[in-house]
Amino acid sequence: MAVPVSGMSDLTTYVSDHIVDEHCDCMFLYNTYQWPWTRIASLIAPRPLLFVNSDHDTIFPMDGNERVINRLERVYSLFGAGDVVDSLVSIGGHAYRQDIRQGSFRFLNTFLKNDPRTVLDSEVDLVSPGSEPVHPIPPEQLRVFPQDLDLPSDSHNAKIDQEFVPMAKTELPDGGAFPAWKSERLARLRALTFHHFPAQIPAARPTQTNSAGLVWLETEPGVSIPLRQAQPLGTGGRRLWLIASAEDGRQLDWWKQFADPTDGVFVCEPRGVGETRWSRKNPPNYVERAHYLLGRTVDSGRLWDLVAAALYLREMAPGHQSVVLAGEGAAGVLSAYAALLEPGVTEVFLFHPPASHMEGSAPALLNVLRVCDIPEVVGMLAPRAASIVSDSSAWRNITQKIYSAAGAPEKLSLRL
């Protein structure tokens, strides 16, 4: 097989130089294992490969083009196949011109037909330019279905993203099988969803405190989040609440119904929320989209922030207070995941969380549905205490049964 490749650059171009802003999502994969893009093209080696680009293509700039072909040539040399990898650079912008077509056809003829002759009979640019382009064949005649109304009613196009990769089936543990059931799923989550996390996320480091008691915490190099005290720890208080602020920035006063007057309550705004909120446009929404190219999501970073902030509270606590992670909506789900990854969190409180990652309000975590869904994740916290305020039946049908299998049904509180 011989492969002409065009329309590819590297992560320096896409992320550091912001060229991801100019592309549609069809260009990119979820880069779970943080591969450099060149490695993907290198999988073709030692089969023949032609790398095609244009010298003034603004969305595939030449500096990225040169880095890719240089690395490809090095990889091919390791196979002793440097003679079957080459690049073709056309003069002009982003277009499929005649010289590109002829070079690509000659490459294919050479390696598939053993015919290296120059291709002279390539198609030509047939569409006449102008304010009203003239097409040799009217575009509507090239449609498989003449009108939108002719599209099959049972088409999978609009939901193929839900069907391409099979989702995990809910399998609840029996009796004494809970520890093995949990261990297997947690290992898969670490491999598929939190591949970029260390075994132990370090505690956040305070970098600045203002007169109002607002503390800025550095959760990882270059990332700082604000933490403020909403209720001081009273005499005899045994719990420290860490409440994750919701992304939309609405007031967080729901906790007052549930926290004891002596509990210490802290509110943190994980990255991209409140004071650290970045600008968003759709398209291109650079920050969120760039994360996928790096094998992360914004929400996995927020989860990291919650773990780091919880560990900071534990270190700063004056006694032996337990740490409660809590949040509303998606922030509650992230709190559950943070507690799952950090055994030092003793309790979680979820206020009207989404009951599935298939819901639009749920946090985005790569590959998570290959392993489990939100009710199973909360169930994996057993025998630690968990409280859920929700009217969804999923918590009773799944989470409650898992807590029973773990021998800790009394540690799960479900409230309407």
Image (cartoon, rainbow, N blue to C red):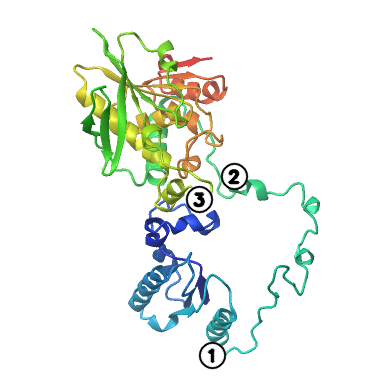
**Is 394 situated above or below 144?**
above
| Label whose residue precedes the other's in the sequence (3 or 2) | 2
Along the line of sight, the residue nearer the viewer: 117 or 137: 137
Q: Residue at x 48, y 79 (%)?
A: 88
Along the line of sight, the residue nearer the viewer: 374 or 173: 374
Q: Position of residue 24 (x, y in %)?
A: 54, 56
**Is 338 situated above or below 232?**
below
| Rendered image: mark on residue 116 | 1
Q: Residues within 10 Å of mark 1 (few under 14, many from 20)?
A: some
User: What separation in Å lies between label 1 and label 2 (alpha carbons)?
Assistant: 45 Å
| Label whose residue precedes the other's in the sequence (3 or 1) | 1
Quarter placement of the C terminus: top right
Q: Position of residue 331 (x, y in %)?
A: 43, 29
Q: Position of residue 22 (x, y in %)?
A: 50, 58
Residue reaching furthest to the left: 318
| Rendered image: mark on residue 162 | 2
User: What separation in Å lies between label 3 and label 2 (alpha carbons)?
Assistant: 23 Å
Look at the image and tell me whether residue 342 can be seen.
Answer: no
- Closer to viewer: mark 3 or mark 1: 3
User: What separation in Å lies between label 3 and label 1 (alpha carbons)?
Assistant: 43 Å
Q: Residue at x 47, y 52 (%)?
A: 30
Q: Residue at x 54, y 42 (%)?
A: 167
Residue reaching furthest to the bottom: 117
Contact (Cβ within 8 Å) of mark 3 with mark 1: no
Q: Residues within 10 Å of mark 2 (few under 14, many from 20)?
A: few
The kind of residue tagged 2 is Gln
Q: Which residue is mark 3?
A: 284
